[in-house]
Amino acid sequence: MSDFDDVHPAQPTGPRALDLAGLKALAHPLRVQIIDALSTYGASTASGLAERLRESSGATSYHLRQLEKHGFVREVEGKGTERERWWERVPGGIAVMVEQIGDSPAARSAAELVTREFQRSRESALQDFIVNGYSTLSPEWMTAATVSSANLRLTAEQLAALVGELEGTFHAALERYRDLDEPGARPVQVHFNAFPVVDGTETATPQNP
């Protein structure tokens, strides 16, 4: 259902599909915010994350340790001290899969929270760009960016085929830019959304004459 990639290549087997334990471990707004901040801005300390997320360093430190236990973050080797540890996101995407959720109310609740928090973060970044981009970014950056959408009427099977085709192209294009950090580079988010409009209606099946 959802694939939340980061700035590193995904594992050869694809993004990590969250089981119930993984969903529960990630199902806290601050933990999702930590994952997203590490993905967007790179490695950080608990105090650095606390300042960025406007939380206490005690809270970020606690949630970092919980995320480490479940393989979402790891300590940066050779950086930091015993008093000031540096953390980074474990490479690879995170996927919330329908088949992993099943009929479990706890899994559905956790999946909704994780998906909602990642989407909230995406929307916040996009809103910040729309509101402040023209006043803070150069014309070069504004010209390079785009905000676009398309509206179609598709069956579930057609949507799945379209998503598969576009995601293949999407990830193939991203691979050319993985792990680059050249002079003049800054964090960039690339969004690909394709979903059914929930309050829309399905086209009726024609009746045989």
Image: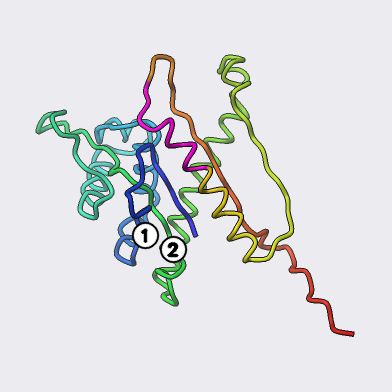
Mark 2, other Cα within 10 Å: few <14 / some 14–19 / many ≥20:
some
Q: Helix, strand or loop at disc 1?
A: strand
| Residue at 41% from the left image edge and 75% from the top image edge | 104
114 displayed left or right of 44: right
- The picture places residue 142, in percent across and down from the top left corner, at 61, 21
- The picture places residue 188, in percent across and down from the top left corner, at 48, 30
| Residue at 46% from the left image edge and 36% from the top image edge | 174
- Seen from the viewer's position, the closer of residues 108 and 160 is 160
- Seen from the viewer's position, the closer of residues 16 and 128 is 16
- The picture places residue 97, in percent across and down from the top left corner, at 44, 63
Q: Quadrant of the C terminus?
A: bottom right
Tag 2–tag 1 contact (CB < 8 Å): yes
Residue kind at label 1, given as amino acid type: Ala
Mark 1, other Cα within 10 Å: few <14 / some 14–19 / many ≥20:
some
- The picture places residue 157, in percent across and down from the top left corner, at 62, 66
Give the vertical position of 161 relative to 8 (above or below). Answer: below
| Residue at 61% from the left image edge and 17% from the top image edge | 135
**Residue identified by numbered label 1:** 17
Q: Is residue 171 magenta?
A: yes
**Residue identified by numbered label 2:** 97
Q: Which residues are magenta?
A: 170-181
Q: Residue reaching furthest right?
A: 209
Q: Spatial distance from mark 2 to mark 1, Cα to Cα?
A: 6 Å
Residue kind at label 2, given as amino acid type: Met
